[in-house]
Amino acid sequence: MAQSPPAAWRCGNTYTDQPCPGGKAVTANDAPSAAQVRDADSHTRQVQADAQRMEHERMRSERAHGRQSGLVHIPRPTTAAATPEQLPPKSQKKKGRKDSDFFTAAGPGTGTAKKKVKAAKTDAGS
């Protein structure tokens, strides 16, 4: 007794080997015909020939243009002394606060609370 090819089931937009509710059985033909094999082999040979032709053209073009490297040469700037106007301004440190050598992360409300200074009330209005 010859075995039939395993059935595939189309369930919505997917295919599976298990039946599903509302699914439709689809037959899958795995073996290509001799003509399909011959056409595929012919196409493969044509693509390989095109690839070799393009490679030879590229190599001929590279030889014609000489060996140019893909690197770009950027000359280094001269080391002339910069005038004070050309230098960026120096940043000034805030006074009264010593910078620590270590970074300490702090979230909101974790720092020391600053006391608000209330204005002194005058007795002139009463």
Image: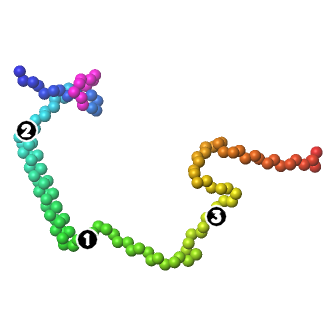
Q: Position of residue 103 (x, y in %)?
A: 57, 50
* CA separation in Å, label 1 and label 2: 50 Å
State the mark number for residue 33.
2
The CA distance from mark 1 to mark 3 is: 50 Å
Q: Residues within 10 Å of mark 3 (few under 14, many from 20)?
A: few
Residue 115 in the image: state x and y as whole percent.
75, 46
User: In terms of secondary structure, what is the magenta stretch mainly?
Assistant: loop
Residue plotted at (26% across, 23% down): 20
Residue type pointed to by label 1: Gln
Indicate the quadrant where residue 65 lies: bottom left
Q: Which residue is mark 3?
A: 92
Task: Classify 45 as above or below 71.
Answer: above
Say whether residue 20 is magenta. yes
Q: Secondary structure at mark 2?
A: loop
Which one is earlier in the sequence, the residue at label 2 or at label 3?
Answer: 2
Type of amino acid at the residue the image marks with label 2: Ser
- Residue drawn at (18%, 70%), measured in percent from left and top? 63
Q: In the rendered structure, which disc, 1 or 3, sits on the residue that comes first in sequence?
A: 1
Q: Nearer the viewer, residue 43 or 116?
A: 116
Q: Give the CA separation, mark 2 to mark 3.
A: 83 Å
Q: Is residue 30 above or below residue 55?
A: above
